[in-house]
Amino acid sequence: MARITLNPEFEDGLRAKLAEYQERLQDQKEANSHAAPELVGLSTRAKIEATKALLESPDGIDTAELALKLNAKYGSEAGNKALDVVTGYNRNGGKSLFAGTGLKKPEKKKPVAALVKTGSFTEALAAQGKPEAMSQEEFQQRYNIDNYAHGEDKFATFDYQGMVHTRDGDVIFKDVMATNGLLKSDGNDGIHVGTDGIVGYSALSENHRMKGPQDVGEYDMYIKIPAAIQQATNSYTQYDQCFAASEFDGTPQELREMRENENYVVIRTNLNPHEDSLARQKMRIIHEGVITHIDNGGKLEQISELVSAMESRLDQIASQSPAALNRVNVSSGKLMLD
């Protein structure tokens, strides 16, 4: 094996492929919700890591070194296959590969940074003449992209309510907000904060086949915390929650093992658009509040409590004056009225 660098001819295709892998892993997690998260989608995880390594290393990657790392984390079968697939795509677009979904030629489109703005992403699309429905690959790329690294404001959030073309030819509705790269540093991609409007927490298949805003029954948050950030903030994630390391009831070695992988904090809210016409506006404020809390160095184990407190406070404000929600400011990390 040798050192290889990113082939610019296939860079856009590899970025689209990374988004495809990330969505595939999410589907695998949902389909195997009762299995240990670290054991789900090993092959897909390996491909994600290999693709990211190539895309994020301007000086190229040492394939022998990366192979050792992938094999140690995901097993030799998954690790070696992932490296073969990714290097094959980078070498000639995958012409030498005999299976898989292939490397799709991306559609020509305006730069992401010109479209993703804090506020209504739907309005940004309309202003630039974009079609009413975007492709699944584009949606996943925007959902997972670190906008700050692409020249956007620090709190740039992918805020989208609209239709998405799926790979199987269907058209579905998505209601999401996503912010990436929080607390990012060398060696980790930063924290991902995602808010999804869904039918219901247990409605797995229905959540992927919504046809319009009328199908949204609740808003939930999914916060991905990399292993390096858990260690740096003296916290750990378990059972979809984040805890202070001081609360861990085990040995130091068990704690280290607990923090070897990125994990999600899942927070369900009581915001239901069928019952509250201001539900999404409240959720947007909560999303911004969580981002500010993290960026200001707030304790990660306090996020669930923070969300609950903000939800209650916003309900109180709206009950007194719905218009007052337009004056809520979370720049200090707390709910304030301008």
Image (cartoon, rainbow, N blue to C red):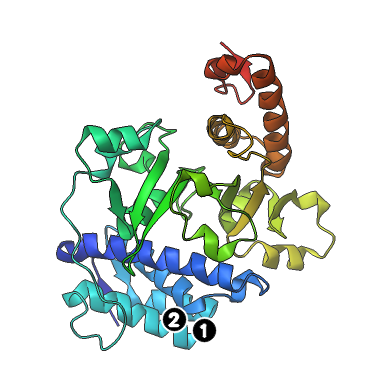
Residue at left offset 74%, top offset 38%: 305
Q: The residue tagged with tag 2: helix, strand or loop?
A: helix
- Which amino acid is tagged 1? Gly
Question: Which quadrant holds the C terminus?
Answer: top right
> Element at badge 1?
loop
The crowding category of the residue bearing disc 1, from other C-alpha atoms within 10 Å (few below 14, some 14 to 19, many at least 20), is some
Disc 1: which residue = 75
The picture places residue 186, in percent across and down from the top left corner, at 45, 51
**In this orientation, does residue 134 appear?**
yes
Residue located 60% across and 61% down the image: 203
Q: Residue at x 23, y 46 (%)?
A: 131
Cβ–Cβ under 8 Å for marks 1 and 2: yes
Query: Are there few (<14), some (14-19), or many (20+) residues within 10 Å of tag 2?
Result: many
The label shown at residue 6 is: none
In this picture, is 169 found above or below 234?
Answer: below
Q: Amino acid at mark 2?
A: Gly
Residue tagged 2: 79
Q: Is residue 244 left or right of residue 103?
A: right
